Amino acid sequence: MTRLVFAVASHLHMTAGAVMASMGAHELFCWHYLLTQDTRAAPRGAQLSVEDEINAWQ
């Protein structure tokens, strides 16, 4: 739980204390899902080339 609080705090440019004071468990776990969904979508070690990434956004 502590690592999640620090990850959210870093992402939102807040202190860990401010995150703990302003967020409940549900919101923290929603952030956990958002912060980790990219790593679940692509297999480890798979990287897009610059051209593939540009094409994905078009």
Image (spheres, rainbow, N blue to C red):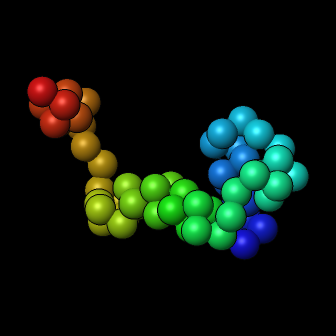
Image quadrant where one finds the N terminus: bottom right
Q: Residue at x 66, y 51 (%)?
A: 8
Number of numbered discs: 0
In this orientation, does residue 46 appear?
yes
Farthest-out residue, right: 17
Q: Residue at x 29, y 62 (%)?
A: 41
Expressed as whole percent of the image width and height from the top left, the position of residue 15 reads 83, 44
* Of 13 and 45, the residue lying toward us: 13
Q: Position of residue 30 (x, y in %)?
A: 51, 62
Horizontal side of 50 relative to 44 (left or right) equals: left
Q: Is residue 8 above or below residue 11?
A: below
Relative horizontal placement of residue 35, taking residue 9 as reference (left or right): left
Tell me: 35 left or right of 7. left
Q: Residue at x 58, y 68 (%)?
A: 26
Report the residue at 72% width, 47% height from top. 9
Tell me, yes or no, if residue 51 can be seen here. no
For residue 28, above or below residue 22 = below
Q: Relative to 30, is 49 on the left or the right?
A: left
Viewport quadrant of the C terminus:
top left
- In the image, 4 versus 46, the foreground residue is 4
Q: Measuring from the top left, give residue 22's x and y in whole percent.
A: 75, 52
